[in-house]
Image (cartoon, grey):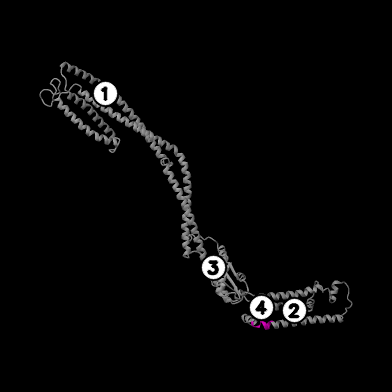
Amino acid sequence: MPLRENMEPGEYLNILRRRKWLIIFSFLFIPFAAFVYSVVTPELFKSSTTILVVPQRVPEGYVRSTITMKIEERLSTIQQQVMSRTRLTTVMDELGLFKTERKKMATEEVVEKMRKRIQIQVASSERTRQRGEGSDAFTLTFIHENPQMAMLTASRLASFFIDENLKTREQQAVGTSEFLESQLQETKAKLELQEEKVKQYKLRFMGELPQQLQANLQILSRLQDQMKSNADATRSAQDRKVYLEAQIAALQAKLDAIAAQVSAAREAAGGTSPDNAVSNLDTVGPMANELAAKKSQLAALSAKYTEQYPEIRRLKEEIPILEKLLEEARRKELASGAAMPAGGARRAGSVPGLFVPMPGDREREELDRLKAQSLTLDSEIAALKSDREAIRKATAALEARVEASPKREQEMISLTRDYENLKSSYDGLLQKKLDADVAQNLEKRQKGEQFQILDPANLPQEPFTPNRPRIFGIAILAAMLVGFGGAFGLEMLDPTLRGTSDFKHFFDLHVLGSIPTIRNEEYDRRLKIRRAAVMGGLVSFTAALTVFLVIFGEKIRTILQGVY
C-alpha cells in the first residue's frame, strides 16, 4: 500500500509482517556471504618497522655535509633502488617468498605483486615529535600470508634501506669531491696559463708597467737635474778654458819676446849653446806638460769613476813611465848644463850644483801649468759632453716609458682582471674541495646522517586483512538496509489498498462494509509459489551452510580459536 502520513505503529508492523521473508532472507544471505568472504579470503599479516633518520654526529658548524637532499627525495631515490627487480628477486630467493606464484607466474608479475605489498610512509614532524622520534622518520610495512615471513621481509628490506642510504651518501660525497677536483684542475691550468701571460708581459715591458710610473718620473726628474748640472758645469768649464787660453796666449807672447832677447844677447856675445843642452830643454818641457796633464785627467776621472774604469787604469800605467822618462831627461839636462860657458851657462861661479835661472824659466813653467790645466779642462768638457749625451738618451728612454704607461695600464687591467677572476674562482673551488674532502671523510667514517631502526619489525598476531569485525558490521548494516529498506520500498511501489484506513485516506467516502479476500485458484497458486520460494530459499541456505561448514570447517575452527 502507499505510505501515508500519520501512520500508526501497528500499520508499520503489518508492513514488516507482510515483508518478513524479505527481511529474514536479507539477514540470512548477506551475513552468510560476509562470513563466506571472511573465511575464503586469504589472511594477510602486516609487519611494520620504524626507521629513524639520525642527524650527523659532528655539528654542521664545523663540518657541512655535501648531501642536502630532503628525506622525501632521498627516500624516493633509495626506494627505487631497493624495490628494483634485482633486489626484490634477491629477497625472494633468500627468504623463499612466493614459491607457488613464481612457478605459475612470470618474474615481473611476481615482483610487481611484491612491490604492491611494500608500503613506505614518512612520519610527519608533529607525529614524530610526539613519539620522540626526532624530526624525521619513516615506516616500512610488508604484507604477507605468513606472519613470520612478513616480519623477516620487513627486517630485510629495512636493512637494505640502511645499507643503501650509507652507500648512496658515500657515493654522492665522493662524486662531489671528484667533480670539484676536476673543476679545480681545469681552473688551475687556466690560472697558470694566465700567470705565465702576466709574467711574460711584465718581462717584455719591464720599465713601462703602471706600478713603475712613479719611479720613472722620479728618475726622470733626477736626470733633468743632472742635465741642468751638466750644462752649468760645461758652461763653467768652457768659460775657464777661454780664460786659460787667453793667459796661455799672453805667456806665449812674453816667452817669444824673451827668446828674441836671449838670441840677440847670444849673437852679441858671439857664442852658441851646445846642441845637447838645447835638445834637453826642448824635451823636458813638453814631457813635464804631458805628465801634469795626465795627472790632472787622472784626478778628474777618479772623482767620478771607480778604479776599474779603463781610462783610469791606462793613465795609472802611463804616468809612472812618463815620470821615469822625465827623470832621465832632467839628469841629461843637468849633465849638459855643466859644459856650458861661463857667459851663457846655467852654473854660476865655481860652486858645483848651483844653478841660476835662465830668462823665461818662470814663464815657461807657468805656461806648462796653464797648458796642463787646459788639457784637463778639455778632458772634463769631453766627459761632460759624453755624460750629457748619456743623460739625453736615458731621458728619452724614460720619456718613452712614461708615455707608454697608460697603454700598458689598460693592457695590464685586461690581463689582471682575467687573472683575478680565475684566482677568485680557484680559491673558491679550493675551499669547496677541502670542505668536500672533509664531508667525504665524514661519510666514510659513518659520522654523517644515518638511518637507525627505532622500532624493529613486529610479529603480527592478527591478520591485517580480512578485517572480520568490520566485514560483519558492514554486512549487518547492508542486511538491515536491504531487509527493512526493501520492505518499505516494495510497499511504496505496491498500489494495493489494504483496509478501511487506506481507503479513507484516498477517498472521502463512508465505508458501509468490506469484502473479505476471495480464495480462488489464482490466489491458491500464488500462495503455493510463495511458499515454495520460501522453502527453496531455506533449503538452499541450509545446504550452502552445510557444504561450507564441511569444506571450511577446520579453518572456521582455527578462526574461532583465534577469536576466543
- Marks 3/4: CA distance? 35 Å
- Marks 3/1: CA distance? 117 Å
Give the overall secondary structure of the magenta segment.
helix
Of label 3 and label 1, which has the lower sequence position?
3
Residue at the far top in the pictured view? 268
User: Residue beneath label 4, please?
Assistant: 40
Q: Amino acid at mark 1?
A: Ile
From which residue to which does the magenta span run? 548-554
- Marks 2/3: CA distance? 53 Å
Of label 1 and label 4, which has the lower sequence position?
4
- Marks 1/2: CA distance? 165 Å
Q: Amino acid at mark 3?
A: Phe
Label 2: few (<14), some (14–19) or many (≥20) C-alpha neighbours in 10 Å: some
| Between marks 1 and 4 in the image, the one whose residue lies nearer the viewer | 1
User: Residue beneath label 1, please?
Assistant: 248
- Residue 519 screen position, x and y as percent: 86, 82
Q: Which mark is residue 410?
A: none
Quadrant placement of the C terminus:
bottom right
- Residue 278 screen position, x and y as percent: 19, 23
User: Residue beneath label 3, please?
Assistant: 161
**Residue at (33% x, 29% y) in the render:** 234
* Picture layout, residue 322 above or below residue 268: below
- Residue 51 screen position, x and y as percent: 54, 68
Q: Nearer the viewer, residue 12 or 509?
A: 12
Residue 523 visible in image: yes
- Marks 2/4: CA distance? 22 Å
Confirm or deny contact between disc 3 and disc 4 (CB under 8 A).
Answer: no
Of label 2 and label 4, which has the lower sequence position?
2
| SS type, badge 4 | helix
- Residue 333 screen position, x and y as percent: 17, 27
**Residue at (17% x, 18% y) in the render:** 266
Q: Which mark is residue 25?
A: 2
